[in-house]
Image: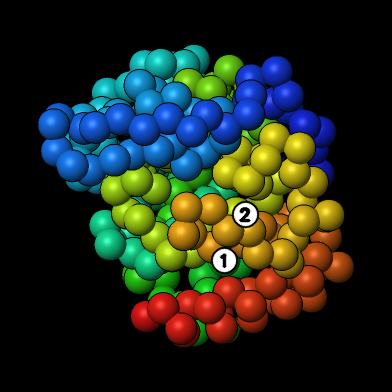
Amino acid sequence: MEPEQPDLFGGLFGEKKEVEIEIENQEKIYTPFLPGVEIGEAYPHVKTLSELEKEALSCQKCRLRSTCNKVVFGEGPEKSRIMLIGEGPGKDEDEQGRPFVGRAGQLLDRILNAAEIPREKAYISNVVKCRPPGNRLPNPDEVHACRGYLEAQIRIIKPAIIVCLGSMASQVIISPKARITQIRGNWFMRGGIMIMPTFHPAALLRNESYKRPTWEDFKMIRDQFKKII
Ligand code: SF4
């Protein structure tokens, strides 16, 4: 489900807009984190993950909801220091309503275990919250419709580290032009958050040669994680 892929979003994402608003007359200032996201699409009135999840569970903003079984919003503590983001739910995730529970998820669990990052301390989600039929890649308009949830999740959780699992997550979170083979294993910093792109676990299941570099990436993630917990 997570092959190398072309830049799917060239037409959708402009330069990051530095926009700041005051939310409900409080002193809190919010600047969108994801490239190209507008404040209005990121649920600025929502303060908690449970409120946001309610919005997502009743969402009909794109066609994926009409074919999926369950909305897979994401799971983990609201105050997680680390977020791991994939591209979209697969068959097992769609059935259970939980992210990364299929074969790729089990491999991710083993990687996290080896990196001494307890899964229960991480917040795990995807760029799109509903399964694309047949495990196809989400279309650009579906990503556009759904990315506000991810933006809001990042705003609410305020992680110290975000791990982008694969090309799509890297393109949505780091840059529309991101190529996972070129940027993986490098830290990016934005808004005080460290971002590490690495291969999606599903890619490791298809290509054994990705395992070594992925482990090298997770060793760096492990070292940073130890510093922040
Ligand atoms: S994929 Fe996202 S935008 Fe589309 S229906 Fe599901 S929650 Fe809504």
Left or right, 182 with respect to 165, comes to: right
Under mark 1, the amino acid is Leu
SS at mark 2 in the image:
strand
Left or right, 209 with respect to 223, comes to: right
Image coordinates for residue 17, horizontal then vertical, percent:
52, 29
Disc 1 and disc 2 in contact, CB within 8 angstroms? yes
Q: Residue at x 37, y 80 (%)?
A: 229
Residue 104 in view of the camera: no
User: Mark 1 and mark 2: span between their CA atoms?
Assistant: 10 Å
Image coordinates for residue 132, horizontal then vertical, percent:
57, 29
Q: Is residue 49 above or below residue 211?
A: above
Q: Residue at x 83, y 60 (%)?
A: 207
Question: Could you say which quadrant of the image residue 105 lies in?
Answer: bottom right
Label 2: few (<14), some (14–19) or many (≥20) C-alpha neighbours in 10 Å? many
Of the image marks 1 and 2, the number of the one nearer the N terminus: 1
SS at mark 1 in the image:
helix
Q: Residue at x 36, y 33 (%)?
A: 20
Image coordinates for residue 182, horizontal then vertical, percent:
83, 54
Under mark 2, the amino acid is Leu
Q: Residue at x 68, y 50 (%)?
A: 166
Residue beneath label 1, please?
108
Residue beneath label 2, please?
165
Residue 126 in view of the camera: yes
Which numbered mark, 1 or 2, is in the foreground of this view? 2
